[in-house]
Image: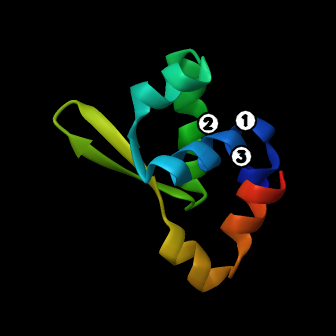
Amino acid sequence: MRALGDPLRIEIVRLIDEEGEILCTELYERLGLPNSTGSYHLRQLREAGITRARAIGPKRMTSLRREDLESRFPGLVDLVIHDS
């Protein structure tokens, strides 16, 4: 839950949820983040089990692990992205 305590990470989760799946570089551009900052925050979310990354050649697509989160913490994702 600590990973969701940061306002920027909540915004990242919100944007990923809206898109379903997004290129990491596109996410950084849309949020105006340097690659190093975006990479750090995505790593925090991935290590916390909130997101997953999928490789497409040298690029990475990021998506929420919504089903996993819903089974463990029903309603958490909606609460975080809609009430923050």
- Quick check: marks 3 and 2 in contact, CB under 8 Å? no
> Few, some or many C-alpha atoms within 10 Å of disc 1 (few <14, some 14-19, many ≥20)?
few
- Quick check: marks 2 and 1 in contact, CB under 8 Å? yes
The residue tagged 2 is 41
Q: Is residue 50 left or right of residue 61?
A: right
Residue 77 lies in quadrant: bottom right
Residue 12 lies in quadrant: top right
Q: Is residue 59 left or right of residue 31?
A: left
Q: Earlier in the sequence, mark 2 or mark 1?
A: 1
Percent of width and height locating residue 8: 73, 35
Taking the view exactly as shown, the residue that stands out farthest to the left is: 57
Distance from Cα at disc 2 to Cα at disc 1: 8 Å
Q: Is residue 1 visible?
A: no
> Few, some or many C-alpha atoms within 10 Å of disc 2 (few <14, some 14-19, many ≥20)?
some
Distance from Cα at disc 3 to Cα at disc 2: 10 Å
Q: Residue at x 53, y 50 (%)?
A: 18
Numbered mark located on residue 8 in the image? 1
Q: Residue at x 42, y 27 (%)?
A: 26
**In the rendered view, would you say 10 is above or below 48?**
above
Percent of width and height locating residue 4: 74, 52
Numbered mark located on residue 19 in the image? none
Judged from the image, the secondary structure of the residue bearing numbered disc 3 is helix
Q: Residue at x 54, y 54 (%)?
A: 17
The residue tagged 3 is 10
